[in-house]
Image (cartoon, rainbow, N blue to C red):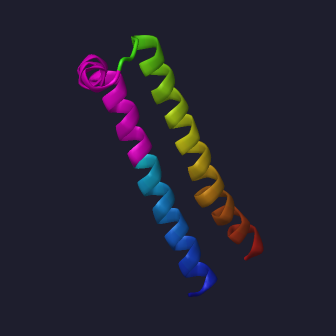
Amino acid sequence: MTINELKDVLLCCLGINYSILFIWFCVFLFAHDALYRLHARWFKLTPESFDAIHYAGMSKYKIGVLLLNLAPWAALCILK
């Protein structure tokens, strides 16, 4: 695999991962109550803890995307 192919793969992965993050955010924003009711049936959660868990999950996912997709892509762009 050449550097250009690797850059293309990382850029594609970056787009897919940000799409997943955007969908997660939109579902959380627009279907918050239904999502909370679904999870509250399985777990004893307050709305505040439910929001905190999702916020933390989204932030960890975003940090992972930045470290595993964007940083290597940027490093390869600087190389060549």
Task: Please state if 16 lies on the left or on the right of 73 as rendered.
Answer: left
* Residue at the image point whose x is 60% and y is 86% from the top: 2
- x and y percentages locating residue 33 in the rendered image: 27, 16
Above-or-below relation of 60 to 2? above
Magenta stretch holds residue 47: no
Q: Which residues are magenta?
A: 20-43
Q: Nearer the viewer, residue 40 or 26?
A: 40
The vertical placement of 11 against 39, above or below, is below
- Answer above or below: position of 58 versus 30: below
Q: How many tags in the picture?
A: 0
User: Quadrant of residue 1 in the image?
Assistant: bottom right
Q: Is residue 55 left or right of residue 27?
A: right
Q: Which residue lies at the image location 45% right of the left edge and 52% below the top edge?
A: 17
For this view, does 80 lie left or right of residue 27?
A: right
Q: Quadrant of the C terminus?
A: bottom right
Looking at the picture, how far across and down is residue 10, in whole percent?
54, 66
Residue 35 is a magenta residue:
yes
